[in-house]
Image (cartoon, rainbow, N blue to C red):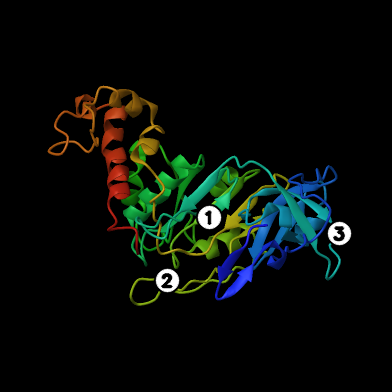
């Protein structure tokens, strides 16, 4: 028998205590199939509880099922707009709690970071068909840098962007709208005195997320589109930063037979794009991506003097592709610069 001496005492195997296992049942990585799970869309998220509207359950539209995240999902992020499978008590009665056990693959994701150096991606909304970028044309003044960054996030997130200009009663929105004409972005005017017929036609039957700085009239627009929404509205402060009037994202059903959803997001002051590579933006525009193949290695596509041999400079500025060069270079500039991400 092996023996040793430590601290003046002789030890052998009989002095070793073996801790018994916690149970005799073998551990397994198998997970329940949950074939009986009911699917639906996450419409609210708040401190570890999610509200879910179930498919084919119209009663849950006005009263979403309150759910927790099942243990087997671990710390899987579940966001407003996600398609999830739910089991447990789905009656929706008071004090009941169902469990989210499945997360469907996302068709689109709108992401941002706190700034351009932050590696942590924040999902703003999942599975949106469209992104309504709300910008006032005055009070506060429009920020092209924010719109450009929102466009980049929409393009790389597989979401169709729409620029929605508010407060058109204060100034002409045309000059600001023309800044984005070469990108073929749909622009709608939604001032307080303007009809919302065009906006309603675009969002009918679709899931549309709204983003914008605080104070641009986003909540006012939501209340006009969904009269029962009762979203809080606020005024713009004297230093140009709006008071944050929406603190949680929420999906709201659109009235009318056409259906659809509006996802109202909190007013934001920053839109970091640390997670986006320039190549991802260029791939969105097939004509420019094709021209890029003729560029020298390492070309940033920003043009002279940095890139004197960029193939984009050979494109005819009188064509749609040539005009798009200027617009996309602005997008790439917004992506590379951290100067305009904060309002």
Question: Residue 143 lies in what quarter of the image?
Answer: bottom left
Depth check: give the residue in front, 62 or 115: 115
Sequence-first tag of 2 and 1: 1
Label tally: 3
Residue 38, position in %: x, y?
Answer: 81, 47
Q: Is residue 109 left or right of residue 261?
A: left
Mark sitting on residue 9: none
Residue named by callout 3: 89
Residue 8, position in %: x, y?
Answer: 56, 76
Depth check: give the residue in front, 104 or 229: 104
Mark sitting on residue 124: 1
Foreground tag (2 vs 1): 1
Disc 2 to disc 1, how far (Cα)? 19 Å
Please report the residue visible at 27 percent of the width from the left and 46 percent of the height from the top.
333
Instruction: Look at the image and tell me in which quarter the C terminus lies.
Output: bottom left
Residue named by callout 2: 242
Sequence-first tag of 2 and 3: 3
Tell me whether the residue at label 2 lies in contact with that at label 1, contact meaning CB atoms closer than 8 angstroms. Answer: no
Relative vertical location of residue 206 with respect to residue 52 in this rendering, above or below = above
Instruction: Look at the image and tell me in which quarter the N terminus lies.
Output: bottom right
């Amino acid at each position: 028998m092996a023996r040793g001496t430590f601290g003046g005492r002789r030890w052998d195997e009989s002095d070793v205590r073996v801790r018994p296992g916690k149970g005799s049942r073998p551990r397994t990585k198998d997970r329940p199939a949950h074939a009986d799970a009911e699917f639906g869309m996450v419409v609210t998220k708040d401190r570890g509880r999610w509200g879910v509207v179930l498919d084919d359950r119209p009663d849950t539209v006005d009263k979403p099922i309150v759910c927790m995240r099942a243990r087997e999902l671990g710390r899987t992020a579940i966001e407003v707009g996600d398609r999830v499978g739910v089991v447990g008590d789905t009656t929706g009665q008071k004090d009941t709690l169902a469990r989210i056990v499945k997360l469907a693959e996302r068709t689109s994701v709108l992401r941002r970071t706190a700034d351009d150096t932050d590696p942590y991606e924040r999902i703003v909304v999942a599975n949106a068909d469209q992104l309504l970028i709300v910008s006032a044309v005055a009070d506060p003044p429009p920020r092209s840098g924010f719109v450009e960054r929102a466009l980049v996030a929409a393009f790389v997130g597989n979401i169709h962007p729409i620029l929605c200009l508010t407060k058109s009663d204060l100034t002409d929105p045309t000059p600001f709208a023309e800044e984005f004409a070469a990108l073929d972005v749909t622009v709608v005017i939604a001032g307080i005195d303007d009809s919302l017929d065009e906006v309603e036609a675009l969002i009918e039957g679709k899931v549309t997320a709204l983003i914008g700085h605080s104070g641009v009239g986003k909540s006012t627009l939501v209340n006009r589109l969904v009269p029962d929404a009762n979203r809080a509205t606020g005024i713009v402060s004297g230093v140009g930063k709006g008071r944050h009037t929406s603190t949680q994202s929420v999906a709201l059903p659109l009235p009318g037979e056409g259906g659809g959803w509006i996802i109202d997001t909190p007013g934001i002051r920053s839109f970091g794009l640390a997670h986006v590579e320039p190549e991802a933006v260029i791939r969105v525009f097939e004509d420019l991506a094709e021209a890029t193949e003729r560029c020298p290695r390492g070309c940033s596509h920003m043009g002279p003097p940095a890139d004197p041999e960029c193939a984009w400079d050979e494109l005819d500025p009188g064509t749609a592709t040539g005009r798009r060069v200027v617009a996309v270079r602005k997008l790439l500039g917004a992506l590379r610069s951290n100067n305009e991400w904060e309002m």
